[in-house]
Amino acid sequence: MTTSGQATTSLVSALESATVHGAPDGLVTAVCQDSRQVRPGAAFVAIPGGRMDGHAFLRHARANGARLLVVQEDQRPTWEELRYAGTPLVSVPDTRAALGRLAAAFHGYPARDLTVVGVTGTDGKTSTCFLTAAVLAAGGLGTATVSTVGTVVGGVLAPNQRHLTTPGVVEVQRFLAEARAAGARAAVLEASSHGLDQGRLASAEVDIAVLTNLTGDHLDYHTPRTSCRRRSRSCAGPPAVG
């Protein structure tokens, strides 16, 4: 599956409960959530955040050549006047979920061609990822891995430069696409509780979820502990529709 471009109309159809303003056409050449990374032809997805709201950068993304803007319905005051600005705009209930669906659709739903294992828990995730990958490889199943250490595709380790246990959702879908292209039949993903909470495994379509343990660490972020348990269970959530 090439990622040189996907039909804009096809990507829009992957979004649930979407309202389209304008007439999407042409090819989308990338999916971004950072307006600074937008180049002509990209789809920009505005994600609300605690410190920054992507909706504040819609005009910047448009100026950089975005072919499609994806916005959250409840942020209407930030984007309503852009409906008439010429760049097709799509409003959805949840842009974080939409970002995962768009990234998966852009890469041709790579998770559907792989057995995806998600490993979460407080301790032991990285070791468990590599042990799992080794067992799968010993069984003749070509396996790619993404973890705190980095990504392994085709036996080549690319060190983790961003120091995130779980990459962003766009990077996860790119990794799955690269794993598929390299001939892998399985992918093992280290899933931090922060990453799960922030939807970084959205549309990863995890087939097997592994929970190493659950202790008191990170409860400054997840309060109470039941929240952390819910995030752990979300590692095996339902697959995306598309």
Image (cartoon, rainbow, N blue to C red):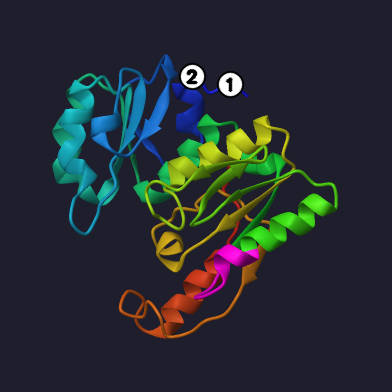
Q: Are marks 2 and 1 in contact (CB under 8 Å)?
A: yes
> Quick one: which residue is furthest to the top in this view?
26
Q: Where is residue 203 in the image (x, y as percent from the top left)?
A: 54, 48
Front position in the image: 185 or 44: 185
Q: Where is residue 102 in the image (x, y as percent from the top left)?
A: 46, 37
* Residue 92 placement, left or right of 184: left
| Residue 17 showing in the rendered view | no
Front position in the image: 162 or 50: 162
Which amino acid is tagged 2?
Gly
Indicate whether 128 appears above or below 108.
below
Q: Which residue appears at 74% of the width and 56% of the height?
A: 134
Pointer 2: residues within 10 angstroms few (<14), some, or many (20+)?
some
Q: Which residue appears at 23% of the width and 32% of the height?
A: 36
Name the residue carrying label 1: 2
Pointer 1: residues within 10 angstroms few (<14), some, or many (20+)?
few
Name the residue carrying label 2: 5
Give yes or no for residue 124 being in the magenta stretch.
yes
For label 2, the SS is loop
Q: Which residue appears at 45% of the width and 48% of the height?
A: 160
Which amino acid is tagged 1?
Thr
Front position in the image: 72 or 65: 65
Quadrant into which the C terminus falls: top right
Q: How many labels does the image show?
A: 2
For label 1, the SS is loop
* Residue 59 placement, left or right of 174: left
Specify start and end residues of the magenta stretch as a single range: 120-128
Question: In the rendered image, which quarter is residue 62 located in?
Answer: top left
Q: Position of residue 187 (x, y in %)?
A: 66, 49
Q: Position of residue 236 (x, y in %)?
A: 61, 63
